[in-house]
Amino acid sequence: MKEIYTESILMIERLHRRFLDVVKTELDRLKIDDINNVQTLILYNINHEQLTIGELTNRGYYLGSNVSYNVKKLVENGYLVQERAPHDKRSTRIRLSDKGLQLCQRIDDLYQRNVDQLSKQMETPTLTALNQTLSQLERFWTDYINNIHKVK
């Protein structure tokens, strides 16, 4: 079981990196060079919402330590609009600009092309079962973390 568990963890990590490569390839194909693949996924996950940077991180839309840097670059390159929250001037909210929304549509087109191709190789129940298994693993890790904090 330990070998299978370790293999699963490594596979999840490799899949994430490979998907980032897919997004990078699409950006290259579109000749878009003012945004990277991680920033593109941040945009795609925000989509039509208005969020604070804290909400972006808490929702799991962003993994990494440089969220402020990436948001700054996305604002500088015209993909995000950053505005002070009306109720709390210390807090800022971010939303996609028209340029950001256009890129999200192009990434959505990529997702649809991927789905169309994948559906020829994999049936929906197989992918559904995979998602259920990954959700169970996520719950296991969450419970583990929560239980460790209770012991302290």
Image: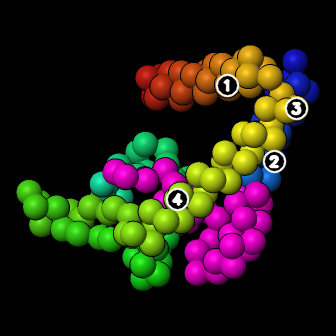
The answer to which of marks 1 and 3 sits earlier in the sequence is 3
User: Does residue 127 sit above or below 23 in this rendering?
Assistant: above
Q: Residue 115 location in percent, x, y?
A: 72, 39
Mark 3–mark 4 contact, CB under 8 Å?
Answer: no
- Of residues 63 and 108, the one nearer the viewer is 108
Mark 2–mark 1 contact, CB under 8 Å?
Answer: no
- State yes or no: residue 129 in magenta: no
Give, as a three-letter code, the residue at label 4: Cys
- Label 4 Cα neighbours within 10 Å, binned few <14 / some 14-19 / many ≥20: many
Q: Residue at x 54, y 65 (%)?
A: 103
- Of residues 70 and 141, the one nearer the viewer is 70
Choose top left, top right, bottom left or bottom right for residue 98: bottom left
In which quadrant is the C terminus drawn? Answer: top left
Q: Which residues are magenta?
A: 20-49
The answer to whether residue 84 is left or right of residue 129 is left
Cα–Cα span, label 1 and label 3: 17 Å
Cα–Cα span, label 3 and label 2: 20 Å
The answer to which of marks 2 and 4 sits earlier in the sequence is 2
- Label 3 Cα neighbours within 10 Å, binned few <14 / some 14-19 / many ≥20: few
Please tell me whether the stretch drawn in magenta is mainly helix, strand or loop: helix
**Residue occupied by mark 2:** 14
Residue 62's label in the rendered image is none
| SS label for mark 2 | helix
The answer to which of marks 4 and 1 sits earlier in the sequence is 4
**Residue occupied by mark 1:** 131
Q: Residue at x 49, y 50 (%)?
A: 45
Give, as a three-letter code, the residue at label 3: Gln
**Residue occupied by mark 3:** 121
Extreme residue toward the right, this view: 3
